[in-house]
Image (tube, grey):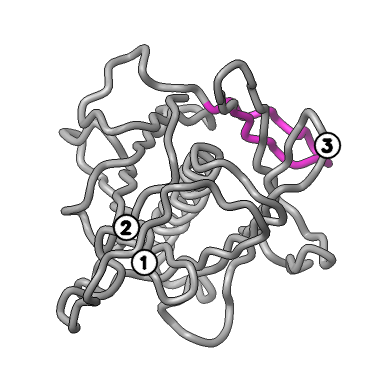
Amino acid sequence: MSNLERPPTYSSIDPRQQKPSSTSSATTPQDSEHTLTLHRAQDHARSTGIHIKQASTTLYYVGHYNNPAQSSDIILYAGYDALGPWLAQLRFEQYSKDLRVYVGDLKSPVKDDWDVVRCADGGVFGEDEWRFECRSGNTKTRLHWTRTKDSRLGASRWGLRDFKLVDEGRDVVVAVYVEKHLGERALRGSVRFLEGVEGRVEVAGLMVLLGLLDKTRRFMGSVRRAFPNVNGW
């Protein structure tokens, strides 16, 4: 994947509110543990957009698209909305659990620009792993997201959308996503990075996670449409 620093904050608050006098910048990689929270973007009642925040600062806007004419299913923008610079894109593979991710500012990446995120089937008793690579100079880091129920990481025993990000070379958990079930309705969940990561690792990791969450959302939507009278879906 292409080199990418953590983006500056182009719009840290709702533009309908008073704007800050200066724009904060976060162009360097995070060097310590930090948490990002996912919030439903309340652009309108049926919005599927997501804001990704660190504390009260909006770092990213996530646009979801379900249009055959659109080349990407998910686009990550810097800042508050889709007017910000393009940072990364994700595309689902038809009839496959694999994903394709592009990290960079091209709006129409060609075939060779995309990186494949391959799903390693966990079998009957294991969990699937979505594996990908991030390159930084001559260094290549292999990672994967997989579901977790580990309470030590904050995951729920019954959660279906709690995930951990594993550095395969070191066999270390570098991040965990825990879905929010109670409290603020707009809050979807949080990603806790357990150690410092480079900007490209953060962006690529977020994109793969967002793809997994959106796949689940689309599947649940198809179930609701097929069985509209089933409670609990």
* Residue 182 image position (x, y, % from top left): 57, 84
Instruction: Evaluate whether residue 91 shows in this view.
Output: yes
Q: Determine whether, in the image, residue 39 is placed left or right of residue 42.
A: right
Q: Amino acid at mark 1?
A: Thr
* Residue 25 image position (x, y, % from top left): 37, 57
Between the C-alphas of marks 3 and 1, the distance is 31 Å
In terms of depth relative to the viewer, which is nearer, 231 or 58?
58
Q: Amino acid at mark 3?
A: Asp
Q: Is residue 160 above or below residue 145?
A: below
Q: Amino acid at mark 2?
A: Tyr
In terms of depth relative to the viewer, which is nearer, 136 or 216?
136
Which residue is pictured at 44% across the width and 28% down the height?
A: 3
In terms of depth relative to the viewer, which is nearer, 174 or 62?
174
Instruction: Name the image quarter holding residue 33.
Output: bottom right
Query: What kind of element bears circle 3?
Result: loop
* Residue 137 image position (x, y, % from top left): 55, 20
Which residue matches tag 2? 61
Q: Does residue 120 show up magenta in the picture?
A: yes
Query: What kind of element bears circle 2?
Result: strand
Which residue is pictured at 70% across the width and 30% down the height?
A: 121
Which range of residues does the magenta coloring cover?
A: 117-132
In terms of depth relative to the viewer, which is nearer, 84 or 28?
28
Which residue matches tag 3? 171
Q: Determine whether, in the image, residue 104 is placed left or right of residue 46.
A: right
Disc 1, disc 2: CB below 8 Å?
Answer: yes
Which residue matches tag 1? 58
